[in-house]
Image (cartoon, rainbow, N blue to C red):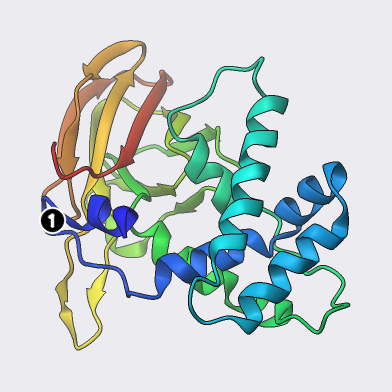
Amino acid sequence: MQVEKILAEGKNNPSMPSNLPNDCLKAMFESSRTYGLFTAYFDEELYRYAATYYQKNVFGRNRFMYGVIGVTRVLEDVEISQRNHLPYQDVKRFLKQDFTTINNEENLDFAIIHKNADIILNKFKRYFTARIDIKLMTTAGDFQILSVSDNKVNLLKPAWYQNGGIGYQIQSYEGKLNFIAKATVSGQIRLQLRSLDIRDPEDNSKRIPYWIDYTKLTMNEKTILDKITPVWHDKPYAYTMEAKANEEIKVTVEWQPHRSDT
């Protein structure tokens, strides 16, 4: 439950469902990434034994899953030991795993895990997905996002955000994001660092605060923020700058899951 404790304490991040860490563990174990790397080094019978054991045992059934996942993580670290590890590597590794199903030789419940993987990931993503709002405060000319470093980014241009300007929402769980924006006219650029807009399932008019720790913000290589700054949707970090016509605005943002001690 250490994961739940870290994510839920402090700024009142909501607690995760009690079964979510276990579901996450099972999804990691049954992913083709874990299966492929483990069986590349060891006999497949060992993997099948662990899989069969946790299906049949109630008490302590996860012990063998821990073993397979732990060994696989060591193998991954050995393979990439010559590279620099990013602070957000563990989260990225899990979210970008290939959750394709593997051969169902032992009648294991891989299909259910595959079906539920997106549900599990969506529940976790709200704890570390950043939302960056950027807006040119004039409707004259044009304002565009020219490039974004994350190829899985969710780039939106909501109709309601076009009142009094031209605005975009950028949502990413990459942990670090570089993007370039450009306006065809001079004007003020407003940028806000937020978390996702998560609503109370029992009252859609109320937002649930999911905190994110932003750690860095630079604009055109000027450091704006370089310390841990907790925010959530209704309490963003805001910055404004004056942009010249046809000037490319280069933005770098870094963040991490909220920690209770920040």
At x 63%, y 30%, the residue is 77
Percent position of residue 69, x then y: 62, 51
Image location (x, y in percent) of residue 219: 32, 19
Going by the image, does 98 lie left or right of 226?
Answer: right
Does the image show residue 65?
Answer: yes
Local secondary structure at mark 1: loop
- x 78%, y 69%: residue: 101
- Left or right: where does residue 25 sit relative to residue 56? left
250 or 127: nearer the eye? 127
105 in relation to 15, above or below: below
Amino acid on which the number 1 mark rests in the picture: Asp
How many discs appear? Answer: 1
As drawn, the residue found furthest toward the bottom would be 202
Q: Is residue 156 left or right of residue 114?
A: left
* The N terminus, quarter of image: bottom left
Where is 82 relative to 156, above or below?
above
Residue 74, image x, y percentages: 63, 35
| Residue where numbered disc 1 is placed | 234
In the rendered view, tell whether residue 253 sits above or below residue 205.
above
In the rendered image, the quadrant that contains the C terminus is top left
- Viewer-side residue, 234 vs 5: 5
Tell me if residue 137 can be seen: no
Left or right placement of residue 38 versus residue 251 in this view: right
Give the vertical position of 37 relative to 159 (above or below): above
> Camera-side residue: 113 or 212?
113
For this rendering, which residue is in front, 262 or 63? 63
Which residue is depicted at the point 65% across and 43% down? 71
Residue 11, image x, y percentages: 11, 52
Residue 139 sits in quarter: top left
Number of other residues with Cα within 10 Å of mark 1, as a class: few under 14, some 14 to 19, many 20 or more: some
Residue at (44%, 32%) from the top-left corner? 176
